Image: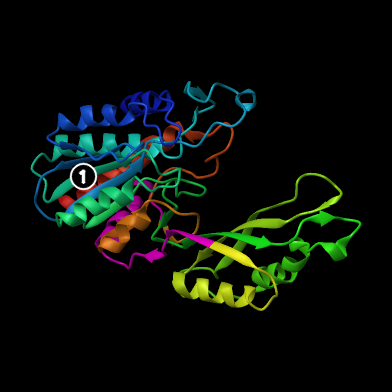
Amino acid sequence: MSNILELLKDLISRESVTPQDAGCQDVLAARLTKLGFKEERLDFEDTQNIWLRRGEAKPLLTFLGHTDVVPTGPLEAWVSPPFEPMIRDGKLYGRGAADMKGGIACFITAVERFIAKHPDHQGSIAVMMTSDEEGIATNGVVKVVEVLEQRNEKIDWCLVGEPSSDKKIGDVIRVGRRGSLCAKLTIAGIQGHVAYPELADNPIHTFAPALKDLTEEVWDHGNAFFPPTSLQVSNINAGTGAENIIPGSVNVQFNLRFCTELDEETIKQRTRAILDKYDFKYELEWRLSGNPFLTEPGALIDAAHAAIKTVTGFETLDDTGGGTSDGRFIAPTGAQVIELGPLNESIHKINEHVGVEDLEILSDIYEQILVNLLV
């Protein structure tokens, strides 16, 4: 346990707010290169990425993680400084404790123990890290995967250490994720005085019926693995701030978390069909954050279920909930991908924390997965 805590405290103490790494990857590389891992830096612009691999044989099991964290929020709201790890009441507090430096510390220490016991294991082990998961994720894992694909270096199994657990460690594993499609919509109007609406064109008023249609649209009914697709408006902005001016335009941001019943182009076509029913000018920009993916039952899921049962004694639940993760960039290569990590209750919150005893359980589960797949 002391080994896991020592590493996790070191990682938390580094202020790696996205896209900064703050030396976290150096710490991991120093530990793993001693065990025969080959280190490769794959940095792009302001993002630091590292690929560490031990062995050349197939199959290849990869642990995927991110060293960047979200901003702290108001420091005065924290019971202890967010980058000064503190243990209280059996919990380790600090930004990134659960998302996802806790998972990183657990799988690094699991790999260390596994190699000490099984130095001549089958296949290969890799660790992929980025500092751009909590940001827009344009120079992180997506770019590393492009490099691997260009040289035909294929991942067979990918375990993402994101915080997937609900009430206790290992009670939920993510076997897929919904897609995420972001939109920026600008509706044009004519600015004017509120006392003379006949001389202006209020874009908020003209857009309102279309907004109702967009939010009430039944995009699909989901399926056995995913809930129905959801459109959520995240921001509406218009006007100058003055109370007597009709705005000249309104800017709307919305996001669709979509399941495997839909695809990007279908969503775009149906959105435009709704907007085109109304008499206003608009501009629409799209950004695909990731397509949905689903890992079918196979060796990786079986190994995870068996490991959780061995370590904890209970059966786990397969799930596809939550937001996006970097697993969305690995799945299209043909790899089996799951997410298994700490409790997700405190992630991105003030006073983020992870249970001290949970760390040992999670690290033991990771080690047992290694045994189940590579011994």
Residue 62 sits above or below residue 278 on the image:
above
Farthest residue to the front: give it: 199
State whether residue 304 is above or below residue 341: below
Does residue 310 show up?
Answer: no
Q: Position of residue 277 (x, y in %)?
A: 66, 79
Is 167 colored magenta in this rendering?
no
Quarter of the image where one finds residue 112? top left
Residue 331 visible to an observer of this rendering: yes
Name the residue: 45% across, 69% down.
Answer: 264
Q: Which residue lies under the disc numbered 1?
A: 126
Q: Which residues are magenta?
A: 285-314
Between residue 101 and residue 262, name the one nearer to us. 262
Q: Is residue 138 above or below residue 181?
A: above
59 relative position to 234: left or right? left
Residue 265: percent from left, percent from top: 45, 73
* Left or right, 229 with reference to 108: right
Q: Amino acid at mark 1?
A: Ala
Q: How many marks?
A: 1
Judge from the rendering whether residue 54 lies leftward or rightward of residue 345; answer left or right.
Answer: left
Q: Quadrant of residue 351?
A: top right
For the N terminus, the image quarter is top left
The residue positioned 35% from the left and 38% from the top of the image is 47
State the image coordinates of residue 328 (x, y, percent, origin top left): 37, 57
Residue at the (50%, 55%) spot, across then down: 322
Judging depth in this view, the residue of 354 and 66 nearest the camera is: 66
Camera-nearest residue between 227 and 370 = 227
Task: Please tell me how crowded label 1 is: few (under 14), some (14-19), or many (20+) other residues with Cα within 10 Å.
Answer: many
Identify the secondary structure beneath mark 1: strand
Where is residue 86 drawn, in percent x and y?
A: 49, 22
